[in-house]
Image (cartoon, rainbow, N blue to C red):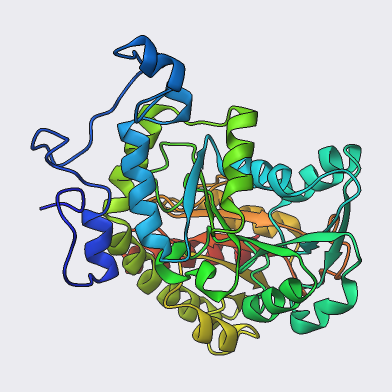
Amino acid sequence: MSTGDHERTIPLKTETTLVTAGRDTKAQKGFVNPPVVHGSTVLYATADDLHAHRGEYQYGRHGSPTTKALQQALMALEGPQCAGVGIAPSGLAAITTTLLAVLKAGDHLLVCDNVYRPSRNFCNGMLARYGVETTYFDPLIGSAITSLFKPNTKAVLIEAPGSQSFEMPDVPAIASAAHSHGAIVIDDNTWATPLFHRSLEQGVDISIQAATKYIGGHSDIMFGTISANAATWPSVSDAIRFLGVCAGPDDVFLAIRGLRTLAVRLAQHHRSGLEMAQWLAKRPEVLRVLHPALETDPGHAIWKRDFTGASGLFGVVLKPVPEASVDAILNSLELFGMGYSWGGFESLVIPFDCTSYRTATKWAPGGPTLRLHIGLENVEDLKADLARGFDALRAG
């Protein structure tokens, strides 16, 4: 059975949709997975077909059976508000393509102060050179964001939650305020994915993911997705074509493969991440844990209202210690790798400090901060690894 073979007569749960959406076993000659189409040139049968560009596919950059399978599956995951999904060669490319799609010289953009730092760099760099003004705002502003709108404000970019400091914005309140001023809302939804947070259903117009992370799931691809509603999809689709944005067929196939197991993996990331956060919150070396699924977190009520789960990424604020003591933790860990990514099967840790680039809010957590990604290892092994790290901290 496959969604490409017939119209379904019964609604499916999300886990089933992830396994079946985008599959057409008849077109795939009976194979479960779609073919990996390596191709640029598409041949036309007749001159009339050539002149009319008549055919399901016209050129490799514009799509193939492989990309179609992924797009269909992602649309099913995003929900009925999704009118189209664009694919990009990285998460950052998805963000920059989207901003170029909806903004022009003279426009004003509102950006959440906890946004992904490369997004901020793009706004302060290329968008500024192109005559787009950016204003940063407190992630916790909620409906009070209405005071920041100008006549030329065209879009609001949020990240729910921020992937370093983990403040949880009130997405529906921000979306309502934006729409009342004629602006659209763009959400970086990488942390939860549409599996745990269908942001298009909460008023967001364009949902972006760095599919490098949880959709890929194995730390072996660079990929981005742009999911848009009916009002914004034409602009996004045009920008993708004008800019020549595309992804290679092997990465597209790996994204499809990862998508099939997303529900299983994210359920484990959720369980392990929350257990580790609760354990860390009780450690004497820890000042506080930055995880919206914890009941003590300031963003917990919003998370509980708007999300159905949490990923394995969160932050930890240590009690004040010298930098050398933090380094002692990092150098002693055996299971936590040090790397600037997340969403794969492996656990990761990095120190971070937002002080130098936060502009709308002051970053003063009270101690050194670490970002942890809890992978798919045994939780007790991870606890033991971090306990050894804390031993090294005290010895240092």
Residue 1 location in percent, x, y? 10, 53
Task: Looking at the picture, tell me which residue is in the foreground, 85 or 351.
Answer: 85
Q: Nearer the viewer, residue 56 or 311?
A: 56
Please say if 324 is above or below 280. Answer: above
In the image, taking residue 355 as reference, residue 298 lies left or right, namely left
Q: Front-most of 135 and 191?
A: 135
Q: Compared to 204, does 274 lie above or below?
A: below
Residue at the extreme front: 48
In which quadrant of the rendered view does residue 139 lie? bottom right
Residue at the image position 61 percent from the left and 63 percent from the top = 205
Q: Is residue 319 left or right of residue 59?
A: right
Nearest to the observer: residue 267 or residue 154 = 154
- In the image, is 29 to the left or to the right of 305? left
Q: Position of residue 262 (x, y in %)?
A: 32, 57
Residue 41, compared with residue 289, is above or below; it is above
Residue occupying the point 82% across, 83% down? 144
Q: Visible in this render: residue 84?
A: yes
Residue at the image position 46 percent from the left and 79 percent from the top: 279
**Residue drawn at (81%, 47%), measured in percent from left and top?**
123
Image quadrant containing the C terminus: bottom right
Could you tell me residue 132's position as x and y percent? 88, 47
Answer yes or no: is residue 288 visible. no
